[in-house]
Amino acid sequence: MRTLWMAAAAALAAGGLVGCGSGGSEDTSGGGTAPAPTPTPPAETLALTACAASGKGTDYPVGPGQTYTTLDQVPWESLKAGDTVRIYYSSTPYKGKFLVAAQGTSTAPVRICGVRGPNNERPIIDGSGATTRAALLNAYGNTAETQNIHQTRSVIVIKALANGSYSDYPTWIQIDGLNIRAGHPNYTFTDAAGATQRYTDFGACVWVDRGQNILIADNEISDCQMAVFSRSTDDGEFTVTRNLRIAGNYLWGHGVVGSELEHTTYTQSVGTVIEFNRYGPLRTGALGNSVKDRSAGLVVRYNRIEGGARSVDMVEAEDFPTTARALSAYRSSFVYGNQFKKNGDDGSFFHYGGDHFGAPAGANWGESLFRRGVLYFFNNTVHGTGTNARLFQISTTLERVEAWNNVFWFDPSVTLVNLRQAENDSLSTSYTPDGILNLGVNWIRSDWTDTDAWHTLKGQVIGTEKLIGGTSAPFDTSSSFVPLASSSIIDAGQANPSAASAYGVNYQLNSSYTPVARTVKGAAIDLGAVER
């Protein structure tokens, strides 16, 4: 059975589950604004196959009339390389939650996948009222406290077995084709000990506690604290999440009302790739971001991202700074080919650098942990609503944003169009706030200013003479983001600078948010995320 994303896979590179490949080489310099070498671009592939047994391990079919009829019958604690858990569509949602700790391989990954229904429906895994396999109790934790921590914060958790070796970690795990929902403090579940519990505020539908080569693809994930969370620490290589790929999912309705701590996705890994996804708005009243990231080797490409206090928030590695700062990839982030739409009144669109300020001299927190590198931001289309727009918030002058081939349009209701937002005024005297913004060719509404009347920004903006302006939207703002005929953004793009020359803009999302190949049709690439 073909999925929405499998139809596009034929146009993409062949292969199954692939690593992200953007972890970067070691860099012991400890800082600087010019990362070297630039990380190798991760492979561009979704390449999902039908949800079928791999033939390399045990097949666990789940569903009406199958060997297993409920999720808690599956021996999750015993999965091995090559095993496949095939969850068949059922008109009744599966009320279950589980843990994945298996160690797959590149040629025999462990796959949990959905077999679609007669109308192409994904099987639903519903965390509200879910039951948990009793045999997982000691796998979640060695004490009642740790068991509760891991059970109350997720519907699906990827972590090592607590009753196994401390240095174990899951590898080559693939979760695809499912509708995962309702792991939020609004709901309760039955834990592995048979007690009724409520989900905690800080959690996620899919929580990656540790693991390497993890693919989360072609799912619909909704109504949790967050859709996906990944964690890394400095306790050893086995506690570092590496090569996490979030691809081709529909993520919407997350967050906790009144809280800015929970986001649609929140990642802290080495080699994080977020691509081909559709991010819907957070739940009404939630104050988090769409994409929050503390990774080394971040690539965000070919997504449709709507809502959020910030569209993309790229800040310091909070829990594994020693590991992250030793990688050159920590100093280079790539955001390209995306469609963004949000209310500018909710916050700046793009934040790069760090978010814990004012550290005293010698402290192992604060500005010394910031990215101190370059955000490469190109061929994105931004549609702002509301009354204010503040595009880039750059923490210090040790951070730089290189921006080219983008389109920045704001509705007529937006009366303030600012290139930058002032950063935290409490920065210590050792650092200069507001960063460096280096502009190539970009299109922006012609009444832009660098900042507002209430702030005098430090840092620097370079290249404003290269901006192309206009007073009306140069693309279809209703849904497709396709450039309008004869608009000035057609064939106006420049070549990528040498540091990003390997990062081609090879795909785009169509009006149905399905990925298709992008081909330059004129003398040069069009500005923005979509080629006319």
Image: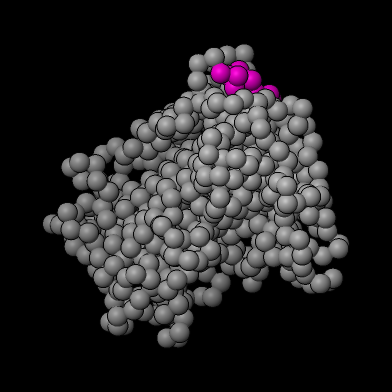
Outermost bottom residue = 144
Q: Nearer the viewer, residue 274 or 26?
A: 274
Residue 123 coordinates in the image, percent (x, y): 26, 52
485 relative position to 133: left or right: right
- Dividing the picture into quarters, in which one does residue 424 lie? bottom right
145 relative position to 488: left or right: left
Decide if residue 327 is in sight here: no
Outermost left residue = 65
Decide if residue 65 is in sight here: yes
Residue 77 coordinates in the image, percent (x, y): 37, 70
227 relative position to 320: left or right: left
**Residue located 54% across and 14% down the image:** 486
Most common secondary structure along the magenta stretch: loop
**Residue located 64% across and 67% down the image:** 319
Residue 422 coordinates in the image, percent (x, y): 72, 52
Decide whether residue 503 is among the magenta residues: no
Q: Nearer the viewer, residue 249 or 235?
A: 249
Q: Nearer the viewer, residue 222 or 97?
A: 222
Residue 516 coordinates in the image, percent (x, y): 44, 29
Please say if 30 is above or below 33: below
How many marks the image carries: the answer is 0
Decide whether residue 488 is among the magenta residues: yes
Q: For the N terminus, give its image quadrant.
A: top left
Q: Which residues are magenta?
A: 487-495
- Dividing the picture into quarters, in which one does residue 133 lie? bottom left
